[in-house]
Image (cartoon, rainbow, N blue to C red):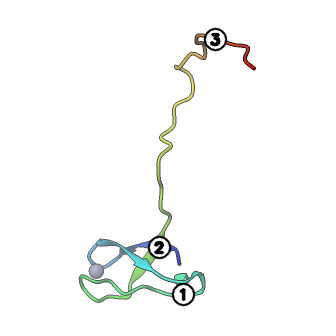
Amino acid sequence: MPIYEYICNACSEKFSQLRSMSESEKAAECPRCSSINTKKVMSSFCCSGGDSGFASSGHSHGGGGG
Ligand SMILES: [Zn+2]
């Protein structure tokens, strides 16, 4: 069962709840103010832009083998 993140519109509390995919569409109750005025947010992990910069080059170690 995936964990979904929600944000309360009433108190701006961010919380996560363990809900099934079907239930994820339903409004989650805020654990702080018990309000159901919440919205689901996408959990973002890693990836903070940035392309150019790192140069791709390195040493070739060893080789051959058997
Ligand atoms: Zn709240």
Of residues 24 and 9, the one nearer the viewer is 24
Quadrant containing ligand 1 reads bottom left
Q: Label 1's element?
A: helix
Residue 52 as seen in the image, left or right of residue 4:
right
Question: Relative to residue 2, is residue 56 depicted above or below?
Answer: above
Q: Label 1 sits on what residue type?
A: Glu
Label 1 vs 2, first from the N-terminus:
2
Picture quadrant where residue 29 is located: bottom left
Question: Relative to residue 36, is residue 61 depicted above or below?
Answer: above
- State which mark lies toward you, 1 or 2: 2
Instruction: From the image, tell me which residue sits under label 3.
Output: 62
Q: Label 3's element?
A: loop
Check the image and name the residue furthest to the front: 66
Label 3 vs 1, first from the N-terminus:
1
- State which mark lies toward you, 3 or 1: 3
Q: Label 2 sits on what residue type?
A: Ile
The location of residue 66, given as percent across then percent down, is 75, 20
Instruction: From the image, tell me which residue sits under label 1.
Output: 23
Question: Relative to residue 41, is residue 54 depicted above or below?
Answer: above
Picture quadrant where residue 5 is located: bottom left
Q: Residue at x 40, y 80 (%)?
A: 38
The location of residue 17, given as percent across then percent down, is 41, 78
Q: Residue at x 29, y 72 (%)?
A: 13
Mark 3 lies within 8 Å of ligand 1 (Cβ measured): no
Instruction: From the image, tell me which residue sits under label 2.
Output: 3
Q: Which mark is residue 33?
A: none
The location of residue 18, given as percent across then percent down, is 44, 80
Q: Label 3 sits on what residue type?
A: Gly
Label 2 vs 3, first from the N-terminus:
2
Q: Residue at x 57, y 15 (%)?
A: 55
Q: CA distance from mark 2 to mark 3?
A: 45 Å
Q: CA distance from mark 1 to mark 2?
A: 11 Å
